[in-house]
Amino acid sequence: MNSEVKTSPLLARARTRARVVRDRYRRLRGRPFGVHARLAALEEEIQESRQLNRRIAELTDVVAELLVLVDDRDEERVREVLAQYRASF
């Protein structure tokens, strides 16, 4: 029998969300309460959201480009695009 314990996708998502909530709680825990504190926290969250949205857009562009290349059977260009993507991070 396989010694690895497989995690269901639902459980993995729940753990990820719990980790995000825990991290946000830790980040906000030491802050004073009030409108100004909440506004600062919201501004931080908006900035984080913008960064994540930009990352998603970049990944979407790469995936779209790869799908076109794979459909055209241009394996050399696929490798080139993947190498460029990996080098950018």
Image (cartoon, grey):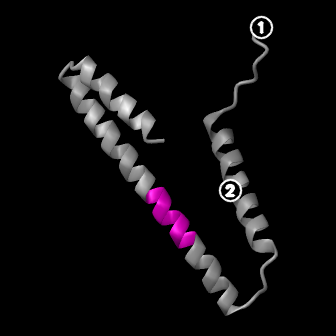
51 lies above or below 7 = below
Q: Residue at x 79, y 85 (%)?
A: 32
78 lies above or below 50 = above
Q: Residue at x 44, y 34 (%)?
A: 86
Which image quarter holds the N terminus? Answer: top right
Amino acid on which disc 2 is placed = Val
Of residues 88 and 9, which is closer to you in this image?
A: 88
Element marked by disc 2: helix
Is residue 80 one of those drawn in magenta? no
Amino acid on which disc 1 is placed = Met
44 lies above or below 24 = below
- Residue 79, horizontal then vertical, whole percent: 33, 23
Q: Which residue is mark 1?
A: 1
Q: Is residue 60 left or right of residue 34?
A: left
Q: Which residues are magenta?
A: 45-53
Q: Which residue is mark 2?
A: 20
Q: Is residue 88 left or right of residue 75?
A: right
Location of residue 69 by image quarter: top left
